[in-house]
Image (cartoon, helix red, strand yellow):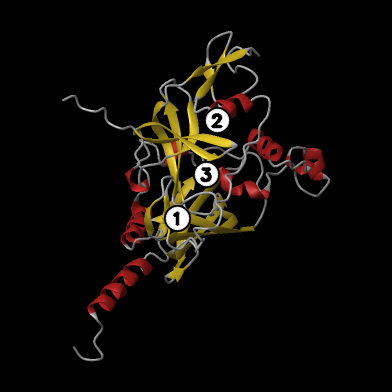
Amino acid sequence: MSAAEPAQGESRDAAYEERLQAFVGAEINARTLGQDAVNVPMIRHWAEAMADDNPVYLDDEAARATGRPGAVAPASMMQAWSMRGYAATWGPRAGGASGAYADLIAVLDEGGYTSVVATDSDFAFVREVVPGEHVSSEEVVEEISPEKSTGLGVGRFVTTLKTYRVGEEVVATQRWRALRFRPKVSTGSTGEGDRSTDEGDRSTDEPRALRPRPALNLDNRFWFDAAKEHRLVVQRCAACGVLRHPPGPMCPECRSLEWDTVEAAGHGTVYSFVVAHHPPHPAFDYPLVIAVVELAEGTRLITNLTGVAPADVEIGMAVEVDWLDADPELSLPLFRPTQPAPQEA
């Protein structure tokens, strides 16, 4: 091989880079009309949720006093008018990602960039939209960065440009940047999860940070008191018998204020889960599996999974309670994969 010839690995890297950069300029979401036109009820819900009492959003007269023709939608709602819900985007009938978007994800996955975190969103508003207008949006890939080293791992920043229109008129643009990265390699399990080799060099002699304290009150103290005794309890309405969790002062079914508890068997299934890598907290080991477990009794609770690698967790996995005595003041129910029953000889 002459000095001018690229090494085989360099050739593969160049070919991969060429395939990845070919997506720059590609349309990953074709122009799609929002499911609903701009409307007052959604504006009201938004303004109340944001505690934004600007009268131009709901009061035509106040809006006209500012030179507007009438009430307008908050500019920051622009994305909401074109967003489609889970069922329309990822549900069984929607089929998930498709076309150029699915192809881009596949190439990124091939390079090991299997994790994602949003980094920033940059809006440019051309004009406000008003009730009755129907917003559409389209999205193209604007830039894919070279490989960069970040606190989360080695990755690439993918920037897309979304254009919002009413008819053919552009009313806003949005540059959306996400980091697609390779999860950092872990080295062994410590019970609650695996610690990343890049998490830090905390000395084994350094006292472990305490887990965050629960906000105790008259409605939930009983649950944490029972947990100290390694008892997993569920609140029950004394009037209609409906179980509820998290605890609350009133039954959502019959509105009775009377309640007692039942002790759960400690068995359930994984209803949903997420693997947390960032931001790190010194009381936890990472990656951290956070799950919603559906108990055999029918209620669900948020917990950590232990005794299982993140890659092996599955929706519907059978799990059983495994108590964690975090410190003398706090015991919590974790869940681990259900152990098979011993075979009789």
The image position of residue 168, as x and y in percent, is: 54, 53
The residue tagged 1 is 116
Q: Secondary structure at mark 1?
A: strand
The CA distance from mark 3 to mark 1 is 19 Å
Q: Is residue 40 left or right of residue 56?
A: left
The residue tagged 2 is 228
Q: Which mark is residue 83?
A: 3
The CA distance from mark 1 to mark 2 is 37 Å
Residue 220 appears anywhere in the view: no
Judged by depth in the image, the label closer to the viewer, 2 or 3, is: 2
Quadrant location of the C terminus in the rendered image: top left
Dots 2 and 3: beta carbons under 8 Å?
no
Q: Is residue 29 left or right of residue 9?
A: right
Q: Nearer the viewer, residue 240 or 73?
A: 240
Residue drawn where x is 49% and y is 31% of the image: 301
Identify the amino acid type marked 1: Val
| Quadrant hosting residue 43 | top right
Other residues around mark 1 within 10 Å, as few (<14) / some (14–19) / many (≥20): some
- Compared to residue 310, the image places residue 187 above or below, namely below
Q: Nearer the viewer, residue 51 or 180?
A: 180
Residue drawn where x is 24% and y is 87% of the image: 5
- Compared to residue 188, the image places residue 326 above or below, namely above
Residue drawn where x is 60% and y is 37% of the image: 329
- Compared to residue 55, the image places residue 175 above or below, namely below
Residue 208 appears anywhere in the view: yes
| Quadrant hosting residue 260 | top right
Name of the residue lying farthest toward the top: 239
Identify the amino acid type marked 3: Met
Other residues around mark 2 within 10 Å, as few (<14) / some (14–19) / many (≥20): some
Q: Is residue 53 left or right of residue 251?
A: right
Mark before the other along the chain sequence, 2 or 3: 3
